Structures are given as structure tokens and as C-alpha cells.
Image (spheres, helix red, strand yellow):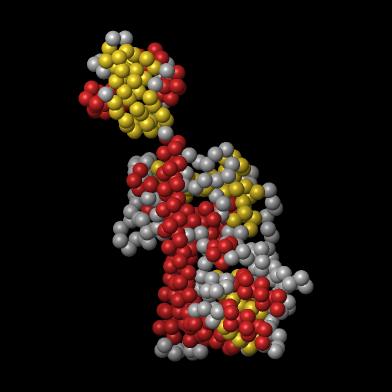
Amino acid sequence: MWVFDLSSEKFLAINKAACGLYGYSPEEFQKLTLSGIVGNEEARRLVSELKRKGSAVNLWRHHTRSGRLIEVETSVHEIPYRRRRAGLAVLIDVTERRRLEEQLRQAQKMEAVGMLAGGVAHDFNNLLTIITGYSQLILNNLRENDPNRHSAEQIMKAGERAGALTKQLLAFSRRQVLQPKVLDLNMLVKTLSAMLQRLIGEDIELRLVLSPDLGRVYADPGQLEQVIMNLVVNARDAMAAGGMLTIRTANAVIEEGPEGGRLATKPGPHVLLAVSDTGHGMDERTRNRLFEPFFTTKSVGRGTGLGLSTVFGIVKQSGGSLNVESAPGRGTIFEVYLPRIEQPLAVEEEKPKESAPRGTETILLVEDDEMVRSLVRETLRREGYKVIDAPDPIEACRLAENYKGEIHLLISDIVMPKLNGRDLAVQITQLRPGTKVLFMSGYAETGLVKAGINERAEFLQKPFTPGALAEKVRKVLEGDSNRANGSGRTEVAS
């Protein structure tokens, strides 16, 4: 609380809480005036309002003695004090509350846009599955010197580029399928460094500051590579005249979420990945919109505005946190915090890739999109499989009950009317305990999480090519995964 003289604007009384908030001693405070704290214009307006109305309510932004900016709600009333007309101000520091409110608004906005982006990507992936799938089937039947081969290849390339775009949408909306493993971030950065140097050009120096005792993280290496690439490209574009780009790793312990960060994270040991540049930096307005999809400060044709949105989605889906520090003329630092784990690195042996052998098994295919169903059916029949297909789960259950032979594999979309893929798989494997299951979908959150599907279940992400489909089907049929047990329960259920 303050009491100040309306004529001289000098402070007449200050309580201990006000001294603690602003960092001044009582003696220092009494040497100041109201203008020295709130500014000349705000002080004149406040005094005028008090004299006219007797009270005023404001939200002020003040600088403390240390220079920290705080937001203060104030309620001021005119009172008599030692035979003077004075103002009594009751102040509440709402800096943290306002920051949390802004984080909530931003999170709600991003979630709404993410739902839209994920839905669009899901539907678009069905179309891309058809485009790239039939393109490959056409290419498989064209000779090398066929004049139509170039046209089919261009369709295939366009489909692949569109598929990369939908992957970014899925990453932003946190609906992509992750394949996490135990990783050493230092090793990942070193592996990428040569390519990153070519990416940023010779006029930008790339500096690696990697902690030698760095802990490990559990994340999808491909997605983390995308995070690093997007942050490096963003830094490069901020240094048109050249500069220094630094990638730093370190162990960190988070007691609270990084102040000002876009993402909350649980306290505990983390690994820090920081990408900093010496570029032109950003103002507050740009920082507030930084992770919005399709927001970009680049000129037309130089970016989709999805790069940092993708970083946002990947980091959040990986259980991490993101913090940004930037100011005009001072460069930018992006800090990614990922939970640190105490597990040994996964060692994988390279296996020579072999062409998937043809099959003779019977497959029950369930897909509500007619064109996708037709593509999958045609692909599998060309590979030698016997395919019975259904447009919905109800018809699929009827076929499973009435079919006389063995059904070796169920291939099902996850998001379908009447019954989702997980519930259908449970019913089919109860009827036919020997049947294996392969799920497919354009996105994963609704399918794998909301539908309750175990993360060990076999999954094929749309869009996929006929070759990828044939390889995955063979792998599932020859593997030991997701076979129902004798109790009627199946590993597809969580």
C-alpha cells in the first residue's frame, strides 16, 4: 500500500509489502514521487481522476528497482492524511497470474487450430494414399523407356511432397505416430552437423557446444532431427548477413516450467538442447505468434509457416518443454527441454533389406473410404493374398462369423463409424483367436490414444505406398505380435 500527497505526489507512507515488491527501502521510497514510479503521464491522469471522482482502478506496468517489469492491479481512493488530500493505493502484483492466463489462452488457441490441422491432415492422407499408391502401381507396369513414365514419376513426387506437408500438420497437432527410442542427443547433433553446415551456408559459422556427460532421452530420432533442422533453418533466415549459430547441449534440473515458456513440463532432471543465433531477433508481437501455424515473417514463397509449429508439436508430444528468448537486435535462443532418463542406448543391428515375399494367406480388410479400400485390396491381391473386404465394422463382423476358411490377418482403419478399429479387432480376435491385426490411419491420437490401442500394436501410417503395405503385411504375418491369447483378450487392447 502507498499513501501519496495529491499536490506534491510525494509518498507519505509505504508498507513493508510495497517495499518488498519494488525493491526500495522505506527511506528510498519517501525520496521518490508518484511520477518516478508510474511515469509522468500516468501520474497526472491518476491524480486528476482522484480529484474528480475520488477513486480509480488501474492495471499498471511498473519497473522495479532491479529493472524487472511487473503488472500491478491498483485500487486508489482519496483520503485525508495528516490534514492533506492524499491518495491511498492498494496494489496487487498480478504478473504471474497474467502470464499463466496468457499461456492458457495460447494453449487453447493452439489446441483448436491443432484439431483443425489434424482433421485436415487425416482426410488428406486418405487422398494421398490413393494418389501415391496408384502412381506406384502404374510405375510398376511401365518400362523404363515408356513416354508416360516421367508423368507418373512427377505425380509420385508431388504426392510425396504433399505427404511431407501433412506430416508437419500432424506433428503440430500432435497426431503423428512416434517411434521413440533411447537417444544420445550429442550423437544425433554430430551426425547432422555436416548437413547443417551445408544448409546454413559458408557465411554462417556453426558452433557445437556439447556437454560430455550428457544424459539420455527417450524420443523419436527422426522427429528430433526435424526439430533441429527447423530451428537451424529459422536461425539461418534471421542472419541474412552472416553470423554465428550455436547448438548447445547440457544437463538441466527443472524446478518449475521455464519462465515465459510455451509449454509446461514436470519438474525433474532434463536434457537441454539450445539453438541460438546472432540474427536480428524478434519483437514481442512476433514472439507471441511464433508457434502459430502458417504465421511467417518471411516473404511470399520462402516458407509455409509450419516449421516452428512443427517444433512445438513434436516437443510437446515428446513430453518436453520449449522456451524462447529474443529481442530486436539481440538474436534468438530456442531452448528445448526433454526429460532425462537413466537407460542404456539401444543397439540395433543393420539388416539387409529384402523384397517382401508374396503371400497366400487370407486377409480381412476393413476401410470406410472406398478408394483406399480398393487400392489396398488390389495391391494385396497382386501380391497373391486372398482378400475379403468390408466398408464398415458391422459388415466385417458378419463376414468373420460366416467365412468358412481361416482368416490370417485383419487390416482395419482406426476411425470408422459405428465401431472403432480397436473394438472391431477385439471382437474379431474373440471369434478367431489366431487372427493377427494391423491398424492403419491418417493420424494417431484418436486412433492409438483415444481408441485405447496398445502402443505395441502393429500400425501403418497413411499415406503409404503399395510396397510399404506389402512389406508391413508380410512382417506382421511372420511375426509373433498382436496374436490373441486363449482368454479372448488381445494385445491390441490397452
Q: From the viewer's side, name the closer residue of 324 and 191.
A: 324
Q: Position of residue 476 (x, y in %)?
A: 67, 75
Q: In the rendered image, which quarter contains the C terminus?
A: bottom right
Q: Is residue 430 above or below residue 57?
A: below
Name of the residue lying farthest toward the right: 486
**Residue 152 visible in the picture:** yes
What is the count of numbered marks?
0
Q: In the rendered image, which quarter contains the N terminus?
A: top left
Q: Is residue 7 left or right of residue 492?
A: left
Q: Is residue 241 left or right of residue 143?
A: left
Q: From the viewer's side, name the closer residue of 376 and 60.
A: 60
* x 52%, y 41%: residue: 257
* x 56%, y 57%: residue: 191
Q: Is residue 30 above or below residue 376?
A: above
**Residue 383 visible in the picture:** no
* x 73%, y 78%: residue: 434
* x 70%, y 78%: residue: 431
Q: Is residue 197 left or right of residue 284?
A: right
Q: Position of residue 401 (x, y in %)?
A: 67, 84
Q: Is residue 53 above or below residue 139?
A: above
Q: Position of residue 33 (x, y in %)?
A: 30, 18
Where, by quadrant of the figure, is residue 260 drawn? top left
Q: Position of residue 430 (x, y in %)?
A: 71, 75
